[in-house]
């Protein structure tokens, strides 16, 4: 496995590709709920792996969308029952992999190694969805002392690209009470842009193994 520092030039090139499409974070499409994203990506009869599954809430969320998948979970926390407790021990392939709010808890090198492992267990035309706190919303990242690595949207896309994934889409997510949503998105959006901060909570990157 190459050291991430030896692959920095490659990361920079992949990051630059995304940056040319989305010059600023505000150019990235905004979604209210991740369920809106999943509904368009996860299909019936897929085999799906949930990385950092916790209490396996995603299993119920997908079922509530009316989508029937073969669900497998992975988490390092052994207080809940999972199919896998280490990424390195995963020995089957999947049509879809989701990894929500996990990669920021790893070092940059660990993140690259995990992405390459996930690429190796992904079926052709398989889809991966990775989310991370939006670093343009400082409170989202800084409020958790276990966070190790900051990822801007273009850097996360670059990491997935180095691992072999083709970047299909990037999204920002934000949902709130109607009056707060309307105020931040429609009335004060210009002010957030002027200050260089964002109200969106998370960044979602969708990649594909072609």
Image (tube, grey):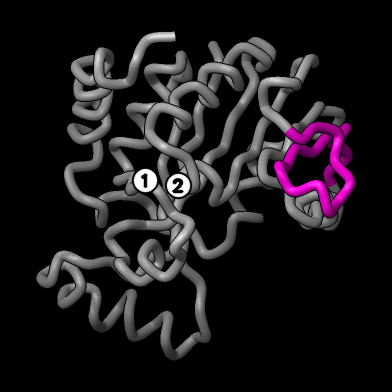
Up the image or down, 177 lies above or below 5; here it is: below
Residue at point 27%, 15% (across, down): 7
Q: Which residue is identified by label 2? A: 104
Residue at point 25%, 57% (across, down): 26
Residue 9: name its quadrant. top left
Q: Position of residue 201 (x, y in %)?
A: 43, 64
Q: Where's the N terminus, which quadrant?
A: top left
- Give how far apart the Cα atoms at labels 1 and 2 are: 5 Å
Up the image or down, 193 lies above or below 181; here it is: above
- 6 sits left or right of 139 in the view: left
Q: Are marks 1 and 2 in contact (CB under 8 Å)?
A: yes
106 is within the stretch colored magenta: no
| Element class at badge 2 | helix
Q: Earlier in the sequence, mark 1 or mark 2?
A: 2
Q: Position of residue 112 (x, y in %)?
A: 44, 25
Q: Position of residue 144 (x, y in %)?
A: 46, 65
Q: Which residue is identified by label 1? A: 149
Magenta segment: 67-85
Residue at point 19%, 28% (across, down): 16
- 118 sits left or right of 183 in the view: right
Q: Where's the C terminus, which quadrant?
A: top right
Magenta span: helix, strand or loop, mainly?
A: loop
Query: In front here: 162 or 21?
Result: 162
Residue at point 33%, 74% (across, down): 185
Residue 151 in view (yes/no): yes
- 104 sits left or right of 94 in the view: left
Query: In front here: 157 or 56?
Result: 56
Question: Within 10 angstroms of label 2, few (less than 14), some, or many (20 or more) residues?
Answer: many
């Amino acid at each position: 496995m190459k050291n991430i520092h030896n692959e920095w030039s490659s990361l920079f090139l992949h990051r630059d590709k995304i940056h040319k499409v989305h010059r600023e974070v505000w150019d990235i499409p905004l979604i209210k709920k991740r369920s809106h994203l999943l509904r368009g990506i996860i299909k019936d009869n897929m085999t799906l792996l949930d990385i950092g599954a916790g209490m396996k809430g995603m299993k119920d969320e997908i079922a509530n969308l009316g989508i029937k998948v073969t669900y497998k979970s992975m988490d390092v926390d052994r207080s809940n029952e999972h199919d896998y407790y280490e990424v390195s021990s995963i020995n089957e392939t999947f049509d879809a992999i989701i990894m929500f709010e996990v990669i920021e808890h790893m070092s940059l090198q660990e993140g690259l190694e995990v992405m390459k492992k996930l690429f190796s267990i992904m079926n052709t035309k398989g889809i991966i969805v990775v989310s991370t706190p939006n670093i343009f919303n400082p409170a989202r990242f800084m409020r958790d002392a276990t966070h190790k690595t900051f990822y801007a949207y273009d850097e996360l896309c670059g990491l997935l690209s180095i691992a072999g994934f083709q970047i299909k889409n990037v999204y920002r997510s934000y949902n709130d009470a109607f009056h707060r949503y309307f105020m931040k998105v429609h009335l004060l959006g210009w002010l957030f842009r002027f200050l260089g901060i964002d109200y969106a909570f998370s960044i979602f990157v969708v990649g594909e193994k072609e």
